[in-house]
Image (cartoon, grey):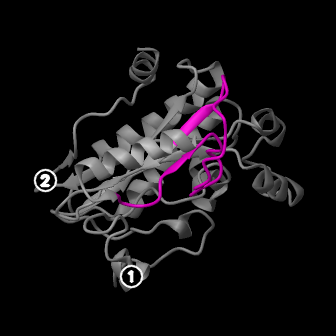
Amino acid sequence: EQYLAGLAEGVTLSYGKGVSFPVILSQRGEVLHNHRHDGILNKGNLLLVDAGAENNFRYTSDYTRTLPVDGVFETKQREIYEIVLRANTEAIVSLKPDIYYRDVHLFASQIIAEGLKELGLMKGDIQEAVKVGAHALFFPHGLGHQMGLDVHDMENLGENFVGYDDTISRSKQFGLSALRMGRKLQEGFVITVEPGIYFIPDLIDIWKKERKFEQFINYAKVEEYRDFGGIRIEDDVLITGNSHRVLGPPLAKTVDELQKMICS
């Protein structure tokens, strides 16, 4: 892991000012913002890579891909990956000016919850499950943030001042409260779209002990995924006059694209 993280840092320095934030590269994808790179790549594991560059004009990027170490997704990995990919692509398609980004977050959350229900990990009324935040066991962070001359642009002014305004306030609900950007999108905004699904053992244990959202979460099934790790897919998107544009050259993202890239 350390070697790969070093390669990424070297490339960014060769072409610009270096990384836009400390590289996240780990087989422990369920650990959010994990900056440790002390693991050895093992067959059957997933490698989560969240990294970005700062160019010579000081503008930043922030991408995430999750890769099978040996080039082949196992069945469970493929199933979870396809859910995250669907949330990522459909959320991006929905982007345009004058819609609340919090609504896009909830839209992606709905897709994730529906996919997890299909696998037997969630149950019951999925719309209600998302409303009360039951899906946050698996998706405990926000869908994305603004980006520009800083990877979390202007947040030193205060997230609540940058990501929210007089028309929308930050939620106090677990998961949704981590959404950095909730207000209406405007032409010229650059935002990240980064849904994920994670199986965090400590969080699972806490919720299970508290019998939290038992009507929506199949804890017996969740135990089968305890050591799964996590998957996140992230792209950078510009809001245009009436739509959006994904920035940068296309990066391998589908299961087939990733497997072909690694095996080549």
Question: On the image, which quarter does residue 158 sit in?
Answer: bottom left
Lower position in the chain sequence, tag 1 or tag 2? 1
Q: Which residue occupies the foreground of this view, 262 or 195?
A: 262
Q: How far apart are marks 1 and 2 (CA)?
A: 29 Å
Q: In this view, does 151 lie to the left or right of 205?
A: left
For the residue marked with disc 2, what is the amino acid? Asn
Residue 262, magenta (yes or no): no
Residue 136, horizontal then vertical, whole percent = 63, 55
Three-letter amino acid code at disc 1?
Asn
Q: Residue 5 carries which label?
A: none
User: Residue 145's x, y, as percent?
Assistant: 38, 63
Q: Give the class, few, some or many, for how many residues have Cα within 10 Å of label 1's Cα (few <14, many ≥20).
A: few
Name the secondary structure under disc 1.
helix
In the figure, 247 relative to 58: above or below? above
Q: Nearer the viewer, mark 1 or mark 2?
A: 1
Q: What residue sits 34% from the left and 78% below the top? A: 162
The stretch drawn in magenta includes residue 34? yes
Question: Observer-nearest residue: 221 or 67?
Answer: 67
Q: Name the main secondary structure of what is drawn in magenta.
A: loop
In the image, residue 225 above or below residue 209: above
Q: Nearer the viewer, residue 157 or 183?
A: 157
Please indicate whether residue 96 sits to the left or right of residue 25 in the image.
left
Please name the residue shown 41% across and 63% down the image.
102
Q: What stretch is highlighted in magenta?
A: 19-48
Few, some or many residues within 10 Å of mark 2 (<14, 14–19, 20+): few
What residue sits right under mark 2 in the picture? Answer: 242
Q: Mark 1 points at which residue?
A: 156
Which corner quadrant holds the N terminus? top right
